[in-house]
Amino acid sequence: MGLTVGGAVAIEVERLSKTYEGTVTAVEDVSFQVAAGEVFGLLGPNGAGKTTTLRVLITVLRPSGGAARVLGMDVVEQADAVRRAIGYVPQERAIDRFLTGREHLQLLADLYHIPKDKATARIDEVLALVNLEHKADEVARTYSGGMKRKLDIACGLIPDPKVLFMDEPTLGLDVESRLKIWEHIRQLKARGITILLTTNYLDEADQLCDRIAIIDGGRVKAIGAPNELKSGLGGDIVTLTLALDDLGRVEALAQAIKGQTGVKAVSTKQQVVDIRVSSPEATLSAILGAVTAHGCRLEFVDYHRPRLDDVFLAHTGKRMKEDA
Amino acid sequence: MNDYVQEVGALTTRWVKRLSRERFSLLFTLAQPMVFWLIFFGNLFQKTANTDIVQAPSYIAFLAAGVVVMTILNNGLAGGTDLLFDKENGFLERMLSTPISRTSVVISRFLFVMTITSAQVLVILGVAYLYGVHPVTGLGGVAVIILIGLLFGVGLTAISMALAFSVKSHGDFFSMLGFLSLPMIFLSSALVPLSAMPGWMAVLARLNPMTWAIDAVRPLILTGWDAALPQIGIVVIVMAVFDAVCLWGAAKAFRKTLG
């Protein structure tokens, strides 16, 4: 797995573990590196350990074991220096509905000890960056979900950070707002900011991230660029969905398909059979032959190049459920 | 040092802004204790209260000290509420990811609660004044009453913040506050003097720091410096112990949440 990166390293996580109250293990033996200038995604379902990892990196949670460094600084030993260098964009709810956008930014500027005169310019700059000037002086109660998200990002940018941490940047947003937020994230990357984000959206990980770490059950299951991970599966995927009456015949069919040449792996879930093949042209007719031979009825056949959810399935043994 | 002033100033300003934008909350915060307790309760028991037993010209005059300290109690115990919401919605985490001193959040909250409490004490004394209760020790006495309020308020606010940081849900927080506040009031000299209480209640009331605060505030309003000074001496010692215990108990919860 791509544990180390060439060039400048922005974030380094080494055998990190976190146990709550001595019993519940949220994260275990997590290691990865993020190169300077990368958009790196932690992909996993809820409770996988993404947010725990993030909270250790932003210095608000102490790890139980292992170490983490941001720009070479230890998140425990040099917490204050880390805090000065990073920006943090929490989930959308972390907005004070009684304050205006500008007041949020002014508060953050004071917490980062930016002198008043410089703060005014900086606040205008980040407001322009996220296109929120027109709502800057209204209280956040009147903001839409997308606007709150933009304000969150603006708050995270106040310290002019070299590394930005984002927790589920588009969770719960409508499609249009999501695309806008993605655009903002790409702009930040173009400015040379290293970004680490958590997500449980496969398409977000796929389209936005240079590299991702798939996390499940508190452990890293795979690391790499989305395309690398997909081609790493070695082959295309044929998915057969059988009629419900054929449930009893699924296992026998899977066994028969496993023996065919060109078939690399077969897995089943209820009446669905996932088959990884090296060359579909040669194998497809053999697969369909086996279906007929077993007297199964096909409801649906799907053939596709590997997608990120196939990667997730291959490494965790289960399908990713996304939260809307 | 400048950094510290800047961050505490900004955090305190936020509490003030929040309160000023919640108009109804502001109104009820200021009006609730004096309306319900001083005016309603005070007038309700005016005729039934025996002035020989309460040792005051009227029941309202007797009650004024009690309502002042009840206000300090309620404000202090509710002092952690905003932090509870900040903890739940992630705002606290946002603040803690910035390079601020770990004490700033707590200190800003103390400053805010103490300021609001002092303002409320003045409002209550003002309303009492309209009912003819004129503090015999004058403005100097009023200043001392506010200082006693600050001494008592520190420990209470510390408990409230520690509770806000420790509870699993905000339902727990509010039910614990409700559970604490009424017994503290009934088992104190706020509504009747200890001499008029059943013996077992008087014993419990003696253990209540609120009683000591009231017993120092009451002579400042009713009798004068001679009677008040010994009580003030005692309350300073009682509150020093009370605050030390509260802060010591709260420190663990603060460290766990604030790092």
Image (tube, coloured by chain):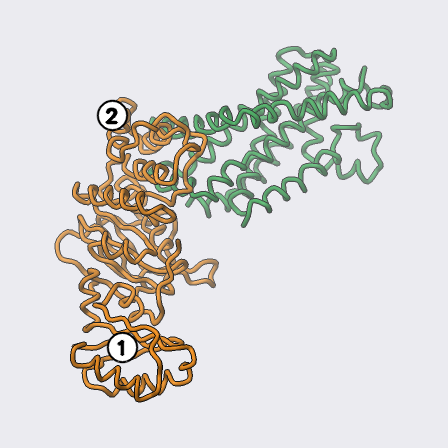
Quarter of the image where one finds residue A32: bottom left
Quarter of the image where one finds residue B153: top right
Quarter of the image where one finds residue A309: bottom left
Asked whether the residues under marks 2 and 1 belong to the same chain, the reply is yes
Disc 1 crowd, CA 10 A, few/some/many (<14, 14-19, 20+): many
Residue at image position (50%, 40%) is B85
Q: Chain of mark 2?
A: A
Q: Nearer the viewer, mark 2 or mark 1?
A: 1
Nearer to the camera, A182 or A59:
A182
Residue at image position (67%, 34%) is B209
Is residue A303 left or right of B91 when viewed as pictured?
left
Looking at the image, residue A251 lies above or below residue A22: below
Residue identifier under label 2: A121
| Chain that is coloured green in the picture | B
Secondary structure beneath dot 2 equals helix
Q: Is residue B4 visible?
A: no
